């Protein structure tokens, strides 16, 4: 069910949208948009507009130049004039280019691609025409061999004529004026007094009679040949134009069908370009389970469109800021009765909803936020404004009742009903009863209904309907003016006396009017006033609560971010401790193997180490200090204090403390040690930042194992090892090369003897490796 689009001014909006079409056919397609609410109609329009939107974004807009030439095909036969044929060639070119762009850029299998595939394959026809006709309508030499020959003969004759006339001018000095053409024949202007000096035929005389135009006998035959060539050219051109026109005649029906498809594509693109210009959004026709408009504006009230309205409609209209409409039907409600002061925006709200629903159904971007939704509709019915029909002898109320009868004949659960000034035009009591009964019926049928009324008894009755809710347009008590904002949950006051006072009605009349108001009306009006005050108070508290919730949400977000940071830091610390634990385990394993090797070497040499020697080996293997020192309580450490670490030479600065592990900075090295191995040094604290190293810094090793390497590999490793030792400040190194064939031992001794940083080197005692290792002192 759909009523006149003019009720919500859709016809004027369609003219605005049509101004973005590239052809007259496209504009007509937009203006004549058929609004159908059959199953899938709105979804198809939405899909077409969405796919065209993506196509324009990727491939750019289509030109549709030449489409309007389709009007030339309306007659019984296409015209044969060169200019008209050139326009029709442009139409064929538009079909070919549009088909390539749409089929190549639209999603395969979609409705837009189907429109592109509906365009005929006119490439052969286009090639046929372009071989014969230039874009400006000139027939080309390539059109036929006969035309090319005729034009060549014409040019030869013309050059021969010009040569003869130049020769004549050189032999007759009195012929100063240039040659010219009269009656399509070349001639020379000759003064009347010199007429006998040039033998020839007189073709014309100047208007003053002072000059005659003579065709010399020398060029008569040449002019005849030129005329014959020109005649053959004209005949061939006419034949070719008729040939092209006949080709268009054979494809007339296909061309007309293609023109209608191009017009539909042009109209689709116009919708997209309109949406881009006004910042509109495409909404699906069944995007939600209920009516919800967020930030909606009526196109004819949008101030940014004033220049476009002036250009297309000849009227500037509104240029003031517009309060966007936020209208959401509550859960379970299908009927909303909107009340409030006159000129408060009730009718605008009703028209905005109706216009938005119709634009969505037609696939036109709307002025609303993307969060807006509409349910699936089976039709739109509007009754807006005064529908008094003088010719039919219908009053305003009678016209409204006839329209209402039509509504009730076909309204169902998918109908959007927009009813302005419900119950007006007759006795208020009768009007109120009719309005209440109509709303009850619309509620029973589950129609989506937005109605406006000034009758407070109707608003009171609405409170008893389970699927209906009251709403009001806002009013600023301080300024005495409407706010144009919609508020759900309570009816609004008409404020007729307040508006009358602002319009200049005398105070005495207003006072008398108040005294004539019934007690029940005064009681209801007072109740509504208190309800409005309470609603405003609750609204303010809701806004304050919203601000507090926003602050709480920000605080919660910050706390969650801090928690994530701590968790990440904890995980990183856990990983670092795991790495350090593995390093210490490897180091302990290496030290244990070295101690066992020392004991094995001593036993192999027949030596029996003393208890003191065994204790020393044990301390080296386990990295232990004296039992007395190990039993001392660990000191209280903090970042920045100076400590002395047993087993390390020199003072170190604490960088961080993690449980029983302490990170210290010693010189340019950073190492982890046990808290129990640290001893406080009574010096002034040093800030960690002053001695901090990067995470990549590691203490340089003092021992290198070359066993199992080739001589060249061992030499490279030894060279890199010495470099790291010198950079790390190591003063004594140990190189384990084993016994084997002695090749690695000789290479090490030779390398160390030539290195400038080596002070001395020698094999250690047998219990430390003997000839299987070499120890060196560095500068």
Image (cartoon, rainbow, N blue to C red):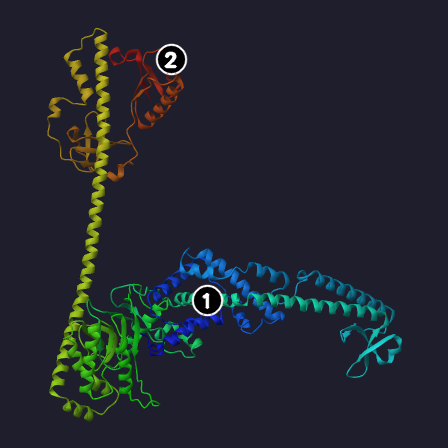
Which quadrant holds residue 530? Answer: bottom left
Q: Quadrant of the N terminus?
A: bottom left
Residue closest to the eye, 309 or 285: 285
Which quadrant holds residue 332? Answer: bottom left
Q: Which label belongs to residue 653? A: none
Determine if residue 138 is in view: no
For the residue carrying disc 1, how many other residues have a C-alpha within 10 Å: few (<14), some (14-19), or many (20+)? Answer: many
Determine if residue 361 is in view: yes
Mark 1 secondary-structure assignment: helix
Position of 59 with respect to 41 (left or right) is right
Q: Position of residue 406 (x, y in %)?
A: 28, 80
Q: Which residue is at a point 25% across and 87% down the rendered structure image?
A: 425
Which quadrant holds residue 238? Answer: bottom right
Residue hosting label 2: 743
Q: Which residue is at a point 60% across and 63% down the rendered structure image?
A: 129
Residue closest to the eye, 199 or 474: 199
- Which badge, 2 or 1, is on the more N-terminal residue? 1
Q: Position of residue 143 (x, y in %)?
A: 66, 62
For the residue carrying disc 2, how many other residues have a C-alpha within 10 Å: few (<14), some (14-19), or many (20+)? Answer: few
Residue closest to the eye, 261 or 382: 261
Outermost residue on the top side: it is 606
Residue hosting label 1: 266
Residue closest to the eye, 594 or 258: 258
Position of 225 with respect to 433 (left or right) is right
How many numbered marks appear? 2
Q: Quadrant of the C terminus?
A: top left
Q: Position of residue 4 (x, y in %)?
A: 35, 78
Kindly report the distance in space between the C-alpha atoms of the residues bearing marks 2 and 1.
89 Å
Q: Which residue is at a point 62% across and 67% down the rendered structure image?
A: 137
Q: Position of residue 350 (x, y in %)?
A: 28, 76
Is 538 placed above or below 455 here?
above
- Frontmost of labels 2 and 1 is 1
């Amino acid at each position: 069910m759909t009523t006149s689009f003019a009720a919500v001014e859709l016809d004027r909006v369609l003219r605005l949208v049509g101004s973005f079409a590239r052809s007259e056919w496209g504009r007509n397609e937009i203006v004549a948009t058929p609004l159908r609410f059959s199953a899938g109609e709105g979804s198809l329009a939405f899909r077409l507009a969405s796919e065209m939107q993506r196509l324009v974004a990727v491939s750019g807009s289509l030109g549709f130049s030449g489409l309007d030439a389709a009007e030339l095909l309306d007659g019984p036969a296409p015209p044969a004039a060169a200019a008209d044929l050139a326009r029709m060639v442009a139409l064929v070119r538009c079909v070919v280019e549009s088909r390539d762009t749409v089929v190549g850029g639209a999603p395969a299998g979609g409705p837009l691609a189907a429109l592109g595939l509906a365009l005929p394959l006119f490439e052969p026809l286009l090639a046929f025409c372009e071989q014969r006709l230039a874009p400006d309508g000139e027939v080309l030499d390539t059109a036929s061999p006969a035309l090319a020959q005729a034009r060549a003969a014409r040019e030869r004759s013309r050059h021969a004529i010009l040569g003869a006339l130049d020769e004549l001018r050189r032999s007759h000095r009195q012929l100063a004026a240039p040659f010219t053409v009269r009656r399509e024949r070349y001639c020379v202007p000759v003064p009347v007094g010199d007429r006998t000096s040039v033998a020839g035929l007189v073709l014309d005389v100047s208007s003053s009679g002072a000059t005659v135009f003579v065709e010399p006998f020398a060029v008569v035959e040449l002019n005849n040949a030129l005329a014959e060539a020109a005649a053959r050219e004209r005949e061939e051109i006419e034949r070719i134009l008729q040939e092209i026109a006949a080709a268009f005649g054979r494809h007339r029906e296909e061309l007309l069908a293609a023109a209608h498809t191009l017009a539909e594509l042009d109209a689709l693109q116009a919708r997209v370009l309109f949406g881009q210009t006004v910042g509109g959004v495409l909404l699906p026709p069944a995007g939600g389970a209920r009516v919800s408009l967020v930030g909606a504006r009526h196109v004819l009230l949008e101030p940014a469109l004033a220049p476009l309205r002036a250009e297309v409609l000849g009227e500037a209209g509104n240029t003031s800021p517009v309060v966007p409409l936020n209208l959401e039907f509550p859960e379970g409600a299908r009927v909303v009765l909107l009340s409030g002061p006159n000129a408060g925006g009730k009718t605008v709200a009703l028209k905005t909803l109706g216009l938005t629903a119709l634009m969505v159904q037609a696939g036109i971007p709307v002025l609303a936020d993307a969060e807006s939704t509409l349910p699936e509709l089976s039709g739109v019915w509007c009754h807006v404004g005064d529908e008094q029909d003088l010719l039919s002898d219908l009053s305003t109320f009678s016209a409204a009742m006839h329209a209402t009868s039509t509504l009730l004949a076909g309204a169902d659960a998918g109908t959007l009903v927009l009813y302005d000034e419900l119950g007006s035009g007759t006795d208020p009591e009768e009007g109120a009863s009719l309005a209440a009964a109509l709303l009850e019926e619309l509620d029973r049928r589950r129609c989506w209904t937005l109605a406006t009324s000034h009758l407070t008894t109707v608003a009171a009755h609405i409170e008893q309907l389970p699927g209906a809710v009251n709403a009001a347009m806002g009013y600023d008590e301080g300024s005495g003016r409407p706010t144009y904002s919609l508020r759900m949950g309570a009816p609004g006051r008409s404020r007729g006396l307040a508006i009358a006072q602002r319009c200049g009605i005398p105070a005495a009349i207003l006072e008398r009017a108040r005294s004539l108001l019934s007690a029940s009306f005064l009681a209801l009006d007072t109740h509504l006033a208190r309800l409005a005050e309470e609603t405003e108070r609750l609204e303010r508290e809701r806004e304050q609560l919203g601000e507090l919730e926003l602050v709480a949400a920000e605080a919660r977000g910050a706390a969650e971010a801090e928690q994530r940071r701590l968790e990440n830091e904890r995980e990183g610390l856990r990983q670092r401790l795991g790495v350090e634990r593995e390093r210490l385990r490897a180091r302990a394993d290496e030290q244990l193997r070295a101690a066992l090797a020392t004991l094995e070497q001593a036993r192999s040499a027949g030596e029996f180490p003393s208890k003191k020697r065994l204790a020393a080996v044990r301390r080296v293997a386990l990295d232990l200090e004296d039992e007395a020192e190990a039993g001392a309580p660990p000191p209280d450490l903090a970042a920045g204090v100076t400590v002395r670490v047993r087993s390390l030479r020199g003072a170190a600065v604490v960088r961080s403390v993690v449980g029983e592990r302490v990170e210290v900075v010693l010189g340019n090295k950073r190492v982890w040690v046990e808290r129990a191995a640290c001893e406080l040094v009574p010096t002034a604290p040093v800030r960690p930042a002053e001695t901090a190293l990067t995470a990549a810094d590691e203490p340089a090793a003092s021992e290198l194992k070359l066993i199992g390497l080739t001589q060249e590999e061992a030499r490279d490793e030894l060279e890199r090892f010495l470099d790291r030792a010198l950079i790390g400040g190591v003063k004594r190194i140990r190189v384990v090369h084993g016994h084997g064939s002695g090749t690695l031992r000789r290479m090490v001794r030779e390398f160390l003897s030539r290195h400038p940083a080596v002070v001395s080197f020698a094999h250690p005692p047998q219990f430390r490796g003997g000839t299987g290792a070499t120890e060196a002192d560095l500068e």
